[in-house]
Image (cartoon, grey):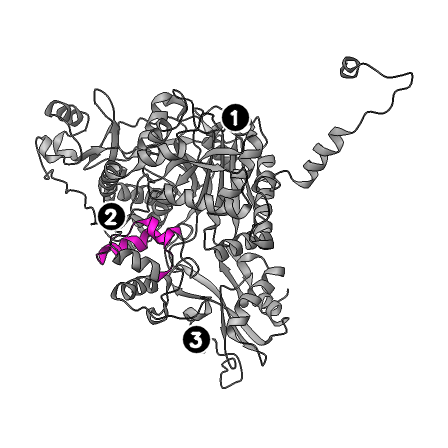
Amino acid sequence: YVGRNDDQVKIRGFRIELGEIESTLAQHDAVRSCVVVAREDRPGDKRLVAYLVPEDGHTAGDLRTELARHAGRTLPDYMVPSAFVTLDGLPLTANGKLDRRALPAPGIDAYAQRGYVAPSTATERALAAVWAELLGFDETRIGAEDNFFQLGGHSLLITVLVARLKERGFDVPVRSVFSSPTLARLAAEIDGGATGPAYEAPPNLIPAGCERITPAMLPLIDLDQDRIDAVVATVPGGAPNVQDVYPLASAQEGILFHHLLDPDSDPYLVSILLAADDETVCARFTEALQALIDRHDVLRSAVLTKDLPEPVQVVHRTARLVVERTRLDRDRDAEEQARALLARPRRMKVDEAPLLKLLIAEAPDSERRYLLLSAHHLIEDASTLRLVLEELAVHLAGRTELLAPAPPYRDFVGQTLHQTATDDAETYFRAALGDVTESTTPFGLTNVRGDGHAYPHLRRALPAGLTGELRAQAQRLGVSPACLFHAAWACVAAAASGSDDVVFGTVLSGRLQGVPAVERMLGNFINTLPLRVRLAGKTVQELVREVDGGLRGLIAREQSPLSLAQRCSGLEGDTPLFSSVINFRHFEPRHGQDAPSLEEAGIHWLAETDAINYPLTVSLDDFGGELSLDLRVDDAVACEAVADYVETALTGIVTALAADEGASTPALGVAVLPEAERRRVLVEWNERPAAVAGGGRCVHEWFE
């Protein structure tokens, strides 16, 4: 398509020709004229909106779904408008040109797929107000039968939704949002008393300048005076430099176990490689990083284990970043040398704060500086890394007035301790896993105590058509695309382990329990828990329902220790439940175009390395438009092959759902082998041997 340069827009990293979308929509018989614009009615949420004048006899309700399908047949998913607004005529200026400023903001009717039913109770109206705030709609148009997910809600927004409801006095479990996604059903659950009183972490009782910390000052942990004194002795500056002491969250305990197993080959170190334009930019970046450490308690935390009944994390009031420098070889390409630093084995002492390292590599004969920033997973996860980079950009731009107060990580730890002490996790996992007596190890991969950094890595985008169908089927069923991804992996795991009853790990965000301000809190929140899926005798429809129910059950217990789930299974000793882990990750931008960026400050992203201890990890990353597979697999199995299996299974799942909602396709009948490989296995490898002249052979002679 050849169009005007000023008609190009960029949404979630994709450069889009608006005229190409308009041309596609105009080909539909029901469209008389149309225009497509990119609107940002909510900061950080730019959407494509199609304004159209329909031919006589066509109504808005009929057109929305039909036009979305029509556009999806020829355009990639990220170019299909998310809203369709019908007008009697396009607004024009006095000169007869399109008046874009006069195009109205899309109302909820442009998104909703059901008739409007006004909220009728005080709770419904309160929910409508919160939904409207988060989703960018007029609250008078949020109906009682509207579905949070069909209006654009997703897991990133759920953390904010639960926190906002808590501020209004509604302590709503995340599982309720999933199980009751319509406004009326969620309100009924709240009014029915299904929610309990909100938990609040006890306050930090250590006063500034304290010369001796006593047990009464540490409400989140039970330590006697001698052990407190031993903890304080490890902190530079002693007691006046101790801000807090509390236990580890469940997910941190598992990460610490693998660190202690082999500190010199720690799988839970993540590193990112950046480039600074010059020494001045490099110095400003270092100052900004120190400012982050000063603001966030988790970045000043150390983890101690020696002579203690349980590991503790101690928050220092001040902690200085240690910066190392190296000079790159003049005779080799500087960037290649810098990228090689990512692969260099590195270790980090976890009993010293901060659990961050910065290595600055100077390029000879150049002002450019390469920045290798390493962090331990004890204090970070993918969402935290995104927040760190966003805040660094704000500091570099001198816009610190944009930053809200930093919420303390201790609030999350307190919530986790409370939840694990009061929930039914042990009963739940015994019921789910008690009769599991065999590990699920796809492709025979069994080493769950390795270092994933050493495994081959592959990133590959899903085809645009498959992405569109995956989103469409998920929306129609009222589930997340993550649910269909888990169902597809269950099919792959079953085929690759020779079992119709499989268990695999799923990574949970950990931020879904309504802790105030958790959406902007730094720290480690993610947790890996086992999902069991039985495929025998089930249709694809039943498989999706089982996976959806299993994920809801895990989300409600997302901070339960993996060790607890392991103990509740029927496996002996330390035999692992599973050796494969999958993860659905959101990477959509959270701020508007005016938010500062690292690029503007002279800092450029180059690469990242991240891994865990399992031999087979598969992530499906949602970038808003594109869905992309990210794999790390033990080199006994090709990454490309595993990606092919996942893509084939996803295709089989959505094809079955599109045909008859998956009601007739057996779950074990979903194809996993791509067609070329299936042909090779069934035909090429099984050709009958040619007849041999001179008579037959005995069986052993054929083998010879």
Of residue 166 and residue 77, the one placed in the foreground of this image is 166
Quadrant of the rendered image containing residue 65: bottom right
246 sits left or right of 701 in the view? left
Where is residue 321 drawn, in percent x and y? 28, 35
Of residue 610 and residue 550, the one placed in the foreground of this image is 550
Amino acid type at image mark 1? Leu
Residue at 54%, 52% in the rendered image: 470
Look at the image and give the residue range highlighted in magenta: 155-183
C-alpha span from label 1 to label 2: 42 Å
C-alpha span from label 2 to label 3: 37 Å
Quadrant where the image shows the C terminus: top right
Is residue 220 something one can see in this rendering? yes
Is residue 359 something one can see in this rendering? no
Residue at 21%, 22% in the rendered image: 308
Callout 3 crowding tier (Cα within 10 Å): few <14, some 14–19, many ≥20: few
Q: Dot 2: what SS? A: loop
Amino acid type at image mark 3? Pro
User: Residue 163 lies in magenta, yes or no?
Assistant: yes
Of residue 74 and residue 236, the one placed in the foreground of this image is 74
Where is residue 631 drawn, in percent x and y? 52, 37
Residue on which disc 3 sits: 104
Residue on which disc 2 sits: 406
Residue 559, placed above or below residue 260: below
Q: Which mark is residue 445?
A: 1
182 sits left or right of 67 in the view? left
Instruction: From the image, state whether disc 2 or disc 3 is nearer to you.
Output: 3
Of residue 87 and residue 694, the one placed in the foreground of this image is 694
